[in-house]
């Protein structure tokens, strides 16, 4: 979850921005250390506690590493504001009586950004030199990613101009913006609309609120977004998009978007049906490592993801595996998002065969070649209880694309055995014991 410190960090980062240059993933920043472990240079230091997922960072990471739309076969649920004219009965765009207000929810990678960018582009009068479309993003980086899509989709309209309302983009007081589309973070957009008068909100035709679930988790953004919305004309088209739809998101959406049509695309449910699960009994960290080596020595593993509880364990394990001759990439939460994306891209391209990571990338990474997921440490929440959702996301990396996957769990104490038993009970799936000292037994699981 996003925290107050994330909001402060974003403010500091935006204030330090001197130009509007796009984010670039530079491969030369990714290099092997003296142990041969591929990671990226960073100056940040953190304590060795379990990495906490940050919604804004995870969303940005998904955008950076995803090259294709998610193939989703789930049904679309439509709730239209006018029950007498359901969407499924119309036969032309004219019958839709566009534009209409919209609340849309679907998982990352299903084309939400393209949908609202198309809506904005269709409403812009390029001959008019003032802001007509306004898009809110939770962070500077996410605003920049959306801006890239706008520039790409609008490239055949050279008269179309885009402005970024983010801290660090300084304008002269009293200046009026001539760009037709403005994208920015709520605090800066609010200042530009009210205090600084750079934007006349009464001329806005389309208002987009992107990443609503991230927005409400960031301090201050929810109230700022509502204040901006109240400054807009009654006939302004309101569009809200979110990857998830918890009650808090729905309540926020109802405040921002009056009389909406609602479109929901159910999240693709991950399943354990195609994944063979095993556990290995060990008495120490070194025994767990030896079991891992035995596993690698007995079966052919195209690519593997290994999850650890702490950065310290992940760094140690990556170094030890590298000493054994494995091509290893290390991913952890102290890295900048762009650095994480570079490591993931190298792994996806097969430049490294083993990805050692903390919980920071338990979501959103689809690598077709991953055949084995290893829980070097079982996932637990902050209270030490089984984190069943994280377990599902972790081993779900391997049972995809219609293939059978393999998940191996390392158990090194009575406590971790109890965690494993509770995970078994939760999913009602038997996790078989595996003796990694028995080569014949290991070879059987690969067949």
Image (cartoon, rainbow, N blue to C red):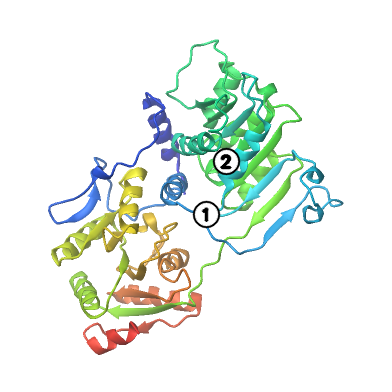
Residue bearing the label numbered 2 = 210
Seen in the picture, residue 401 relative to 329 is either above or below; the reply is below
Looking at the picture, tell me which residue is in the foreground, 243 or 410. 243
Crowd class of label 2 (few under 14; some 14 to 19; many from 20; radius 10 Å)? many
C-beta proximity under 8 Å, tags 1 and 2:
no
Q: How far apart are marks 1 and 2 (CA)?
A: 18 Å
In the rendering, at what x and y percent does residue 386 appear?
42, 68
- Left or right of 296? Residue 162 is right
Where 411 falls versus 56 (above or below)?
A: below
Q: In this view, does 19 lie above or below 343?
A: above
Residue appearing at x 30%, y 62% in the figure: 308
Write down the residue under mark 1.
Answer: 69
Q: What element carries label 2?
A: loop
Give the left or right position of residue 154, taking residue 170 as reference.
Answer: right
Q: Residue 359, located in which quarter of the rendered image?
A: bottom left
The x and y percentages for residue 311 are 27, 55
Query: Earlier along the polypeptide chain: callout 1 or callout 2?
Result: 1
Direction top: furthest residue: 174
Question: Image height check: is 318 above or below 417?
Answer: above
Q: Is mark 1 on a helix, strand or loop?
A: loop
Q: Could one spot residue 17 in this view of the protein?
A: yes
- Residue 256 can be seen, yes or no: no
Q: How crowded is mark 1: few (under 14 residues within 10 Å), some or many (20 or more)?
A: few
Residue that sits furthest to the front in the current view: 156
- Residue in the picture at 15% in, 67% down: 324
Q: Quadrant of residue 49?
A: bottom left
Q: Which residue is drawn at 16% across and 64% down?
A: 320
Give the number of the mark in front: 1 or 2: 1
């Amino acid at each position: 979850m996003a925290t107050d410190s994330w909001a402060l960090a974003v403010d500091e980062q935006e204030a330090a921005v001197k130009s509007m240059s796009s984010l670039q993933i530079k491969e030369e920043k990714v290099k092997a250390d003296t142990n041969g472990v591929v990671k990226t240079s960073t100056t940040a230091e953190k304590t060795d506690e379990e990495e906490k997922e940050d919604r804004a960072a995870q969303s940005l990471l998904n955008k950076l590493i995803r090259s294709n739309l998610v193939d989703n076969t789930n049904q679309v649920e439509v709730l239209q504001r006018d029950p007498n004219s359901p969407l499924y009965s119309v036969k032309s765009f004219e019958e839709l009586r566009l534009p209409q207000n919209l609340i849309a929810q679907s998982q990352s990678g299903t084309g939400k950004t393209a949908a609202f960018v198309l809506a904005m582009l269709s409403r812009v009068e390029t001959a008019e030199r003032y802001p007509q479309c306004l898009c809110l993003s939770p962070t500077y980086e996410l605003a920049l990613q959306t801006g890239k899509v706008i520039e790409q989709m609008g490239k055949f309209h050279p008269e179309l101009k885009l402005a970024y309302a983010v801290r660090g983009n300084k304008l002269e007081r009293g200046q009026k913006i001539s760009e037709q589309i403005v994208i920015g973070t709520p605090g800066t957009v609010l200042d530009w609309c009210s205090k600084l008068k750079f934007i006349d909100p009464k001329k806005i035709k389309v208002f987009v609120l992107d990443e609503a679930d991230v927005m409400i988790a960031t301090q201050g953004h929810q109230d700022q977004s509502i204040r901006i919305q109240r400054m807009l004309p009654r006939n302004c088209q309101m569009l809200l998009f979110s990857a998830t739809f918890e009650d808090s998101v729905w309540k926020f959406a109802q405040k921002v978007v009056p009389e909406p049509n609602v479109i929901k695309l159910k999240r693709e449910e991950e399943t354990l049906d195609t994944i063979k699960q095993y556990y290995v009994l060990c008495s120490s960290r070194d025994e767990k490592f030896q079991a891992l080596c035995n596993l690698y020595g007995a079966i052919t593993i195209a690519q593997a993801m290994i999850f650890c509880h702490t950065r310290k364990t992940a760094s140690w394990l990556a170094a030890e595996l590298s000493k054994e001759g494995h091509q290893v990439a290390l991913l952890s939460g102290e890295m900048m998002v762009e650095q994480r994306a570079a490591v993931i891209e190298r792994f996806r391209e097969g430049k490294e065969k083993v990805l050692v990571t903390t919980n920071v990338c338990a979501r959103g990474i689809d690598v077709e070649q991953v055949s084995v997921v290893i829980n070097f440490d079982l996932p637990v929440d902050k209270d030490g209880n089984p984190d069943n959702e994280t377990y599902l996301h972790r081993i779900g990396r391997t049972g995809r694309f219609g293939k059978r996957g393999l998940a191996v769990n390392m158990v090194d104490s009575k406590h971790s055995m109890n965690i494993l038993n509770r995970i078994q009970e939760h999913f009602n799936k038997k996790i078989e014991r595996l003796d990694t000292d028995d080569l014949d037994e290991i070879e059987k699981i690969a067949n």
